[in-house]
Image: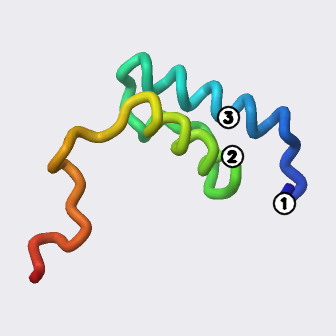
């Protein structure tokens, strides 16, 4: 694991992300700083509460 993060900590972050997404809380409720735990939290959050179609813009209207 990178940066010495244990599988248990990653599992806890994923569980927290999933629960947060299912509860309907905003993704900004993530308690982890940048790094693998935040990535695991956000990944699980987005699987539990994917963004609605058309709400994510990758080009900010620039064509």
In the picture, measured across the screen, residue 56 lies left or right of residue 16, that is: left
Residue picked out by circle 1: 3
20, above or below 50, in the image: above
Residue appearing at x 38%, y 31% in the figure: 49
Q: CA distance from mark 3 to mark 2?
A: 6 Å
Query: Closer to the N terminus: mark 1 or mark 3?
Result: 1
The image position of residue 36, as x and y in percent, is 70, 53
The one nearer the camera, 52 or 6, is 52
Query: Closer to the N terminus: mark 2 or mark 1?
Result: 1
How many residues crowd around disc 1 within 10 Å: few (fewer than 14), some, or many (20 or more)? few
At mark 2, the secondary structure is helix
Q: CA distance from mark 1 to mark 3?
A: 15 Å
How many residues crowd around disc 3 within 10 Å: few (fewer than 14), some, or many (20 or more)? many
Q: Are marks 2 and 1 in contact (CB under 8 Å)?
A: no
Kindly indicate the quadrant of the structure image that contains residue 16: top right
In the picture, measured across the screen, residue 57 lies left or right of residue 35, that is: left
The image position of residue 56, as x and y in percent, is 23, 54
- The image quadrant where one finds the C terminus is bottom left
Residue picked out by circle 3: 13
């Amino acid at each position: 694991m990178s940066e010495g993060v244990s599988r248990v900590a990653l599992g806890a972050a994923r569980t927290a992300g999933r629960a947060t997404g299912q509860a309907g809380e905003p993704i900004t409720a993530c308690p982890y700083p940048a790094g693998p735990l935040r990535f695991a939290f956000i990944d699980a959050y987005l699987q539990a509460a994917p963004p609605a179609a058309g709400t994510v813009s990758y080009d900010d209207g620039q064509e």
